Image (cartoon, helix red, strand yellow):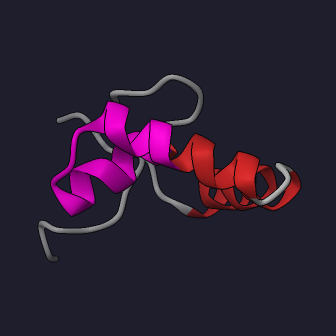
Amino acid sequence: MSQNRLIRSNDRIIGGVCGGIAEWLGWDPTLMRVLYLLASILSIGFPGILVYIVLWIVMPEKRSY
């Protein structure tokens, strides 16, 4: 399996979605959270919240070994 999979992060505030996307892109998790929040607000909130919930359900959780 590839090491560069899109998975939820253990560095989480709510579900680990933004942290997982940030790790996947190699970005700072705080920057990703701020950008996601701004995108959600600018899209009048609902689509951003819906996408977050769907990603929370679909993205696998990071396993700790």
| Place of residue 16 in the rendered image (x, y in percent of width and height, measured from the top left) | 47, 37
In the image, what residue occupies the spot 72% across and 54% down?
A: 42
Q: Number of callouts in the render? A: 0
In the image, what residue occupies the spot 26% across and 68% down?
A: 5
Q: Quadrant of the N terminus?
A: bottom left
48 relative to 13, above or below: below
The foreground one among 28 and 12 is 28
38 relative to 29, above or below: below
Residue 9 appears anywhere in the view: no
The foreground one among 49 and 6 is 49
Asked if residue 6 lies in the magenta stretch, the reply is no
| Place of residue 43 in the rendered image (x, y in percent of width and height, measured from the top left) | 77, 60
Q: Main secondary structure of the magenta part?
A: helix
Q: Which quarter of the picture shows residue 37? A: top right
Residue situated furthest bottom in the rendering: 1
In the image, what residue occupies the spot 77% across and 49% down?
A: 49
Q: Which region of the structure is painted magenta?
A: 18-35
On the picture, is 10 further left or further right than 16? left
| Place of residue 13 in the rendered image (x, y in percent of width and height, measured from the top left) | 51, 22
23 relative to 65, above or below: below
Q: Quadrant of the C terminus?
A: top left
In the image, what residue occupies the spot 46% across and 38% down?
A: 33
Residue 46 appears anywhere in the view: yes
Residue situated furthest front in the rendering: 42
